[in-house]
Each structure stands twice: as structure tokens, then as C-alpha cells.
Amino acid sequence: MDAPGSLKTVDAMNDTNATRNQHHTWSTDDVPGYRVTQLCGTVELLFAVGALIGNTLVILIVILKKKLRTWMNVFLVNLSITDILAALSLCLPMTCTFYRRQWHFGSMYCLIHNLLYPFMMSTSLWLTAFISINRYVFIVFNTIYQRLTSGITVSLAIAFAWGTPIVSFYTAYQDTSLSFYDPSILRCRMSGTLFTVMFLAFTPSFLVLLSYTLIIAYVMHSRRRVRAHAATQPQSSNLSSGPSPQELRMLFTIFAVFALILLCYLPYAIILLVSSASERRQLPESAVLAYPLIHIGGAITPCFTELITGISKRRTKNY
């Protein structure tokens, strides 16, 4: 007697799931509080609008002003492109999801959404890493900088930045079962990819930190050498003391962008790591509130980029 009833229950559940997938919506029973979701939706919308306007202006400025068409700014334009794509494909869908408190974009885009964020994050970090390496070569090996920096090397670097996350998530592209929607945090998630994402973030971040460490060491050594030379031979010609104040300002700006991206991602990453380690569900409202922070970089980065392009305008011939 129990078997038929059980079969009917299973069939009913399957019918419910099929209907739910057909309409591309999920239950809101476990959704965090209304005020939290509306606040996050508003923040996501502001970040999306800021990223679209700011990064579009950066790209137009670089394209329209001939003096700004430098190898350095090619990396910055690609960085702006990633921010625009993230605003369109990540921020705006999440804005709708937070406001409506449901996912209305279907299971296929749930998978795409899960793959796009690590793709955008990794690409942005790799572009930042190549910018840092570019600055290191320019400062420390200035005599060979022009020979090392060409259309071929820059194109290879950009292709690597865009291609690495695609190759890294090749398995995830094929296995759609890894992707699922979690109504408790109002976003799609992907199982078994956290450490891959951390690896994609760690490697370029390490290169950025290494480049800056080497640049700082070079600057300190150059200034000590200049002071020692001035003390022994005050009448002799001045030695180079390293990068100019404008170059140092640019380096600080690039590092500020890098630090901003990582610092804004840390709260959400810590929540996921603690939840994964303890095998317990993370606090839904904490995860929802922390999630919009990972998109703040796309809205603020153009402000820093304006500073960088302004400096480049004054020193174009060296880049």
C-alpha cells in the first residue's frame, strides 16, 4: 500500500520541479529578509550603472585621444571591458534577483552566471598582474623596455589573461550538474570550484605583489645609491633615483585598484570558506550583504583609471 503512494509522491515532486524549471523560478521560502534583499538590489544597481558609465568613458577617452593610445592603456581598456561585461552579465541579473527575490533566468544562465564571475575576476587580476609586470620592466629595465613591449607581447599577454579562466573551467562548462541555485542566498552557486577560483585569484595576485616588492626594493636601492654618491662626489652629475613622482603615483593608483578588488572580495570569500570548512550553511543574510561588495571595483576603478590615463598623457613617449 505504501509503494504506490510513494511513487505518486515522487511523481508529484518531479512534476513540481519540471513546472518550476519551465517557468524559471524557485521558491522564496528560505529567502533572506525583504529589506536586506532590496538594499542589496539597490547597491548592485548603483554599481552596475557606475561601472557602465565610468568604464565606457575610459574606453572612449583612450580611443579618441591619439596620445593615450599606448601599450599601457591597452591593458587598461581591457580591464574596463571586463568591468562592463561584469556589470551587464552579473550585476544587472543580480539586481533583478534581489528586487524580485527569485531567479528568473533559467537553469542554463544559472550555469553561465556561475562561470562568468570567476572568469571576470581572474581576467581582471591577470590584466592587473601584466600591468604590474609592465611597470616593473619599464622602471628596472628601461633600456630594453621598448624592445620587450610590442604588439606581439601585449597581444599574447591579453590573450593569456582572457584564455586562462576558460581553460581552467573547461570541465565546468561541460558538467552542468555542478551548477545549482541556492534560494537562501539568492544566487547561483557551483560545487567543487572554490579552490579553482582561489587558485586563479592567487597566482596573478602573487605576481602583482612580487612586482611591487621588486619595484620598491629597486627604488630604495636607487635612492641609497644617489645619497651615497652625493655624499662622496657632490659636484658630479646626478644619478637616477628611480621612478619619477608621476610614475610612483601611477604605481600607487594601480596597486590601489588591485587592493580594492581583493579587499571587497574578502568578506564573501571568508563566509564561503568558513561555511565549507564547517560543513554548515552560512548565515544567509551575511552572504547576501557581502555579495554586492565584490562588484564595487567595477564602479570605482574608472576613477583610478582616469588618474592613470592623465599621467600617461604627460609621459606618452616613454610608454
Image (spheres, helix red, strand yellow):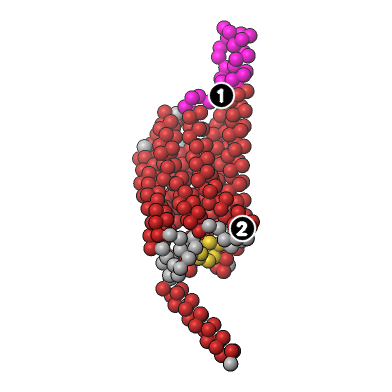
**Residue shown at the point (50%, 41%) measured from the top left:** 260
- Choose between 274 and 93: the one closer to the eye: 274
Label 1: which secondary element? loop
Q: Nearer the viewer, mark 2 or mark 1?
A: 2
Residue at x-position 44% and y-position 77%: 19
Badge 1 amino acid: Gly
Residue reaching furthest bottom?
1
Residue 110 drawn above or below residue 274: below
Residue 27: image quadrant is bottom left
Residue displayed at 58% across by 48% down: 201
Q: Residue furthest top?
A: 235
Which label number is shown at residue 276?
Answer: 2
Residue beneath the point at 50% across and 58% down: 284
Q: Is residue 102 above or below residue 218?
A: below
Does the magenta-highlighted stretch encompass residue 228? yes
User: Which sits earlier in the primary sequence, circle 2 or circle 1?
Assistant: 1
Q: Position of residue 10 (x, y in %)?
A: 54, 82
The answer to which quarter of the image holds residue 316 is top left
- What residue range appears in magenta? 222-247
Q: Which element carries disc 2, helix, strand or loop?
A: helix
Question: In the rendered image, which residue does mark 1 sit on?
Answer: 242
Residue 315 point in image, percent of width and height: 45, 28
Label 1: few (<14), some (14–19) or many (≥20) C-alpha neighbours in 10 Å: some
